[in-house]
Image (tube, rainbow, N blue to C red):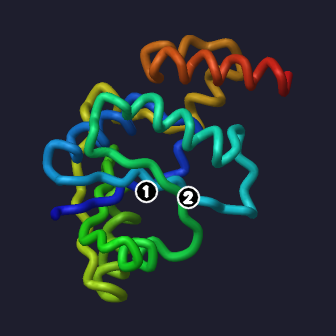
Amino acid sequence: MRRAVCPGSYDPVTNGHLDIIERASGLFDEVVVAVLINKSKKGLFSVDERLDMLREVTAPWPNVRIDSWHGLLVDYCKANEIGAIVKGLRAVSDFDYELQMAQMNQQLSGVETMFMSTNPLYSFLASSLVKEVATYGGDVSNLLPATIEQRLRERLAENG
């Protein structure tokens, strides 16, 4: 079975994330979308909320599974018999950082990294930017699934 992981914080999941996940699901038998648990970072959404949102929006792809992890991604890959990491690249600056990570991961474990170029519609898209725009009332409806946008607006209103 060809298995891959799409790692990230997904705080919140965006249409750019979903583009990469959907495309990866067509290339691998199973794709695990793994939410990074970073206890030193306070996300807008809890890890459990992110997992729930991801389960909801990835439901159309039966070979996509949602999970979380903390620690080294390659350790997660070894423990779950995953041979590839899939990363979306938005710009050259992403490549510079991701190439170093890919080389380190390959050296540590033999796990390969596959880079997918982001759909140009989403080349500027980052969860942090979406949150910032939404905080100031900007329209992010074309950047997120509708249910995620609603949850984002509700959370921002709670934190208001």
Going by the image, does 117 lie left or right of 91?
left
The residue beneath circle 1 is: 7
Estimate how packed mark 1 is, as few (under 14), some (14 to 19) or many (20 or more) residues with alpha carbons within 10 Å.
some
- Picture quadrant where residue 52 is located: top right
- Image coordinates of residue 109 in percent, x first then y, are 32, 85
The residue beneath circle 2 is: 36
Quarter of the image with the C terminus in it? top right
Query: Residue placed at 55% from the left, 50% from the top?
Result: 9
- Image coordinates of residue 50 in percent, x first then y, are 58, 41
Going by the image, does 68 lie left or right of 83?
right
Type of amino acid at the residue the image marks with label 1: Pro
Q: Are marks 1 and 2 in contact (CB under 8 Å)?
A: yes
Query: Residue placed at 73% from the left, 62% from the top?
Result: 39
- Picture quadrant where residue 119 is located: top left
Inter-mark Cα distance, 1 to 2:
7 Å
Q: Label 1, secondary structure: give it.
A: strand
Query: Residue placed at 41% from the left, 50% from the top?
Result: 33
- Above or below — where is 127 with respect to 147? below
Estimate how packed mark 2 is, as few (under 14), some (14 to 19) or many (20 or more) residues with alpha carbons within 10 Å.
some
